[in-house]
Amino acid sequence: MKTRINGINLAYNDQGTGTALIFLHAFPLNRTMWRPQEEALSRRYRVVVVDLRGHGESDAPLWRFTLEQYADDVAGLMDHLSIPRAVLVGLSMGGYVGFAFYRKYAERVRGLVLADTRAQADTDEARTGRFNLAQTAFRQGPEAVADIMIPKLLGASSLKTKPDLVDHVRRMITGNEVSGMIVDLIAMADRPDSLSLLPQITCPTVVIVGEEDHTTPAADARLIVQGIAGAKLAVIPGAGHISNLEQPEQFNKVIDEFAAGLR
Ligand code: MLT
């Protein structure tokens, strides 16, 4: 489905009933990364997955380069779907969007699932890396971005044993517009530090990390858990950075237990 939010077309799926769970995808992917969650969790919850602007079937304008813009789009989608409050499930960049959303719309967050993400802002080195990747995207296109990103996104176990998953990740990346990738990279490079936000987060929170995640490793997850009162940590064996696709059953179990506990 598509709807017009903040002047652009946003693509999303909305299935099931009950507590609303809104899933926010990673860079440079799209909402199809949440297929195993949609399938399993929409039997018990209202599951909304969205292509953030610049991804998948949503428009990819060269527009405001901030994660706050993505948060505004999510709030606009919630208004459109008459969802006053939801559990936000953000993985990696989706987690950064979760922080941006909480900063502005805390009262609309019923709970937070922060997966394979980090609260720290970029180091200077990481920022330079993003601008280099933006140049690569601009000059060489999405295939070159896929070659660089796939080993960062998937854990060693998946790279070795799950060729269909590797294909799916490549298709998500190459299906995106270069303009969307560049906007993401600049928005992530400029995102504020969220460590100081953590003590202000008062909603129930669970932090998930794949044991083989080298992009946002377990130390980053622990830092978030230490900062948010009452936050729980779930480490998923056999998964890298995209833990929800690499070990969907374990990931779904964590979400199911978390969401069931909110009732
Ligand atoms: C992601 O998976 O969204 C990105 O790897 C996040 C990042 O580059 O910081």
Image (tube, rainbow, N blue to C red):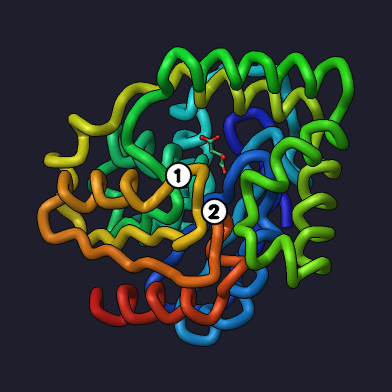
Question: SS class of the residue under badge 1?
Answer: loop
| Quadrant of the frame with the N terminus | bottom right
Q: CA distance from mark 1 to mark 2?
A: 7 Å
Q: Position of residue 244 (x, y in %)?
A: 55, 66
The correct choice, above or below, for 35 with respect to 93 in the image is below
At a point 44% along the width and 58% down the height, the residue shown is 89
Mark 1 Cβ and ligand 1 under 8 Å apart: yes
Looking at this view, is 182 or 116 the one in front? 116
At a point 33% along the width and 81% down the height, the residue shown is 257
Looking at this view, is 136 or 3 the one in front? 136
Mark 2 Cβ and ligand 1 under 8 Å apart: yes
The correct choice, above or below, for 40 with respect to 244 in the image is below
What amino acid is at disc 1? Thr
Q: Is residue 9 visible?
A: no
Q: Quadrant of residue 180?
A: top right
Please give the label number shown on residue 41. none
Asked if disc 1 and disc 2 are in contact, CB closer than 8 Å, the reply is yes
Q: Quadrant of residue 118?
A: top left
Q: Position of residue 243 (x, y in %)?
A: 53, 63
What amino acid is at disc 2? His
Please give the label number shown on residue 241. 2
Residue farthest to the bottom, as pictured? 43
> What residue is disc 1 on?
216
